[in-house]
Amino acid sequence: MTLSLLDRATLGRVDLSIFDRFGVMKIYESTRLEERIEHIGDSEIVLTNKVVIDKEVMAQCPNLKLICITATGTNNVDLEYAKEHHIVVKNVAGYSTASVAQATFTMALSIIGNSAYYDAYVKSKAWSKSEIFTNFDREFFEIKGKVWGIIGLGNIGKEVAKIASAFGAHVQYYSTSGKNHDSDYPSVDLNGLLTSSDVISIHAPLNPQTENLIQKAELLKMKEGAIILNMGRGGIINEQDLAEVIDTRDIFAGLDVVKTEPIEEDNPLLHIRKQDHIRFAPHTAWASKEARATLIKMVAKNIENFLGENHGKRA
């Protein structure tokens, strides 16, 4: 059996030897649109993170039987065409809960504590020249006693809620689907969450209900000095509106994701005047080494289950 991994670079340095038992794997660091059919070739199983597998590709790869998405989202595969042509599509979920929750607090604490400023202050030797033992240039606040609002109370949102509670925050949430309910925390509408929260973290998928959920009108409802974190998907916050509001109000933002990735050089968020009011990470919240190792094991399990099911059918 032949397998093709189309975008190994998106997985980082992970051990892929678990796949050896399934057959020969062709590994490509990346795959451009025009290379997809060539890279898949006669493979029966394809692994992809972000490479688009549409009907044109599937139609020209007749041996293809299983598409393993090395992520939770499935929007890069034409699921309807795959189903019609009996091509199984498997994704993975739940592998990054701890990683994203931890990254959420890394981002939040970086903003709250002005860690970049104070690190630069010490390294510039400014502290060495100070007449006192400390510095009060940038104030910071405690999470204890503050209101932490969560948009999207799925597995990751619940883990963030638990940690925020441990810090002593009062947690509230808004369910974008209306389906997630948790008696441990009060549910509020979006307006109530925006106007009362000191920290807002987004852990929702991108869909018709969440696209452009946070625009200028919503951002203007936030408290002065409040922080908004997007750890979900780019496109949930309108980036042009966020850039404008940051430059006109005293709010802060931390973004692990943006609408177009990698971020484009002309993205308005890279050109705001108040750069100290925003922090970025290049979509790394999901990617702790433990999370990626778990992801690989889950993909291998998907292949194992698929082969087992099909062996049973043949028998």
Image (cartoon, rainbow, N blue to C red):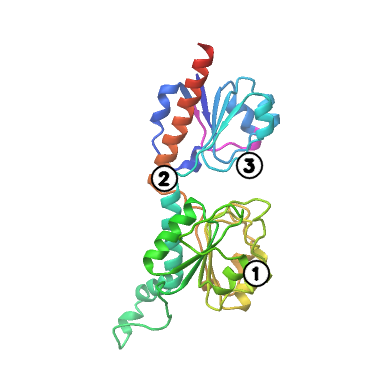
State the image coordinates of residue 200 (x, y, percent, origin top left): 53, 66
Residue, far top: 315
In the image, residue 272 sits, relative to residue 132, either above or below, namely: above
Q: Closer to us: mark 1 or mark 3? A: 1
Relative to the observer, which residue lies in front, 313 or 20?
A: 313
Q: Earlier in the sequence, mark 1 or mark 3?
A: 3
Residue, far front: 183
* Cα–Cα gap, marks 1 and 3: 27 Å
Q: Which residue is mark 2?
A: 291
Secondary element under disc 2, as helix, strand or loop, is helix
Residue drawn at point x = 63 percent, y = 36 percent: 77
Residue type at mark 3 is: Asn
State the image coordinates of residue 107 (x, y, percent, origin top left): 45, 63
Is residue 291 among the parts visible in the rendering? yes
Q: Which residue is mark 1?
A: 218
Is 30 included in the stretch rendered in magenta?
A: yes
Residue drawn at point x = 60 percent, y = 73 percent: 246
In the image, residue 148 sits, relative to residue 78, either above or below, namely: below
Q: Is residue 299 left or right of residue 191?
A: left
Residue type at mark 2 is: Ala
The span picked out in magenta is 26-34
Q: Is residue 311 left or right of residue 260?
A: left
Q: Earlier in the sequence, mark 1 or mark 2?
A: 1
Q: Which residue is mark 3?
A: 75
Residue type at mark 1 is: Glu
On residue 112, the disc is: none
Mark 3 packing: few (<14 Cα in 10 Å), some, or many (20+)?
few
Relative to the observer, which residue lies in front, 146 or 267?
A: 146
Is residue 54 among the parts visible in the rendering? no
Residue drawn at point x = 54 percent, y = 39 percent: 49
Q: Mark 1 near mark 3, Cβ–Cβ under 8 Å?
A: no
